[in-house]
Image: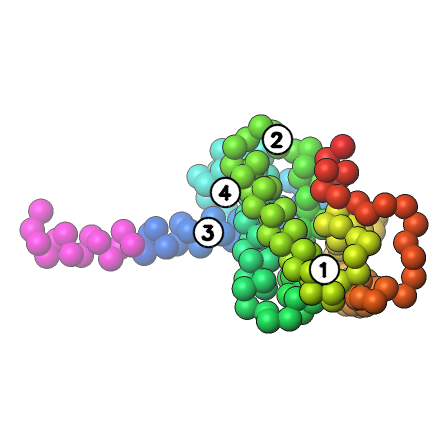
Amino acid sequence: MTTDAVASVKPRTVRLRADATRNRERIIAAAREAIVEHGPDVALDEVARRAGVGNATLYRHFTDRADLVRQVALSVMTRTAQRAEAALAEEPDAFDALHRFVFEAAEERVGALCPMLSEAFDRRDSEIAAGTRRMEASVAAIVDRAQCTGRLRADIAVGDLMIALTQLTRPLPGTRCAGLDRFVHRHLQIFLDGLRAPAQSVLEGSAATLEDLKA
């Protein structure tokens, strides 16, 4: 092959790889939203339709439903950890970092997805385990910093935060997601106001830890 021929092939190869990457990302994003609405058993035809790709394209990227669900879980955990790490690094005020993370985690649908996906993949999967550890550590760092600076009430733990995110961002049974965000953001703000120190009340029971959520 001549030098000119090689040069003409490389740009096309790069474009094909870029297109494939975009298709994969669109499929994962579409699957994330579909799973929130319909659960992990959502029809793959529906995922392909939402992503704007054909079924053949979906199956080129993901061998089966389990593979797709696994990749959605990894994507959500990675993006959630990245958002927590960025908030901690970029926000000078500890409570502002917590505030930013809570709303961005809601955008990732972490509260709605994690409970549904937790039974859909093998917890012995090394990538899933690493993703879980990273996400948990990044969220714990935000909570610890906010408590150390006295901006976050001392009688809550990371588990409390994750439970609240789950409850406040998960669609109600029998409802769709349309218009949900306008209520989610309102209720998250009410929740955050209740986390501020000094506390305005005494909480019953003990703080929920991450270990409690795994029990």
Circle 1 residue: 147
Q: Residue at x 82, y 54 (%)?
A: 155
Q: Indicate the secondary structure of the residue bearing disc 4.
A: helix
Q: Which residues are magenta?
A: 1-14
**In the rendered image of this protein, does residue 89 appear above or below residue 69?**
below
Query: SS class of the residue under badge 2?
Result: loop
Viewer-nearest of labels 1 and 3? 1
Q: Residue visible at 66% across and 66% down?
A: 94
Mark 4 near mark 1, Cβ–Cβ under 8 Å? no
- Quadrant for the C terminus, please: top right
Q: CA distance from mark 4 to mark 1?
A: 45 Å
Is tag 2's residue or tag 1's residue first in the polypeptide sequence?
A: 2
Mark 2 vs mark 4, foreground winner is 2
Q: Is 80 located above or below residue 62 in the figure? A: below
Indicate the amino acid at tag 1.
Gln
Q: Is residue 35 shown left or right of residue 5?
A: right
Q: Amino acid at mark 4?
A: Leu
Labels 2 and 3: the sequence-earlier one? 3
**Amino acid of disc 3:** Asn
Q: CA distance from mark 2 to mark 4?
A: 25 Å
Foreground residue, 187 or 146? 146
Callouts 3 and 4 close, C-beta under 8 Å: no
User: x and y percent of residue 214 in the render?
Assistant: 73, 35
Please identify, in this view, whether the residue under mark 2 or under mark 3 is nearer the observer.
2
Residue 105, above or below 72 = below
- Residue 138 is situated, as x and y percent measured from the top left of the image, at 60, 52
Q: Which residue is mark 4?
A: 58
- Three-letter residue code for mark 2: Arg
For the residue labelled by badge 3, is the local secondary structure a helix, a strand or a loop? helix
Dot 3 crowding, Cα within 10 Å, few <14, some 14–19, many 20+ = some
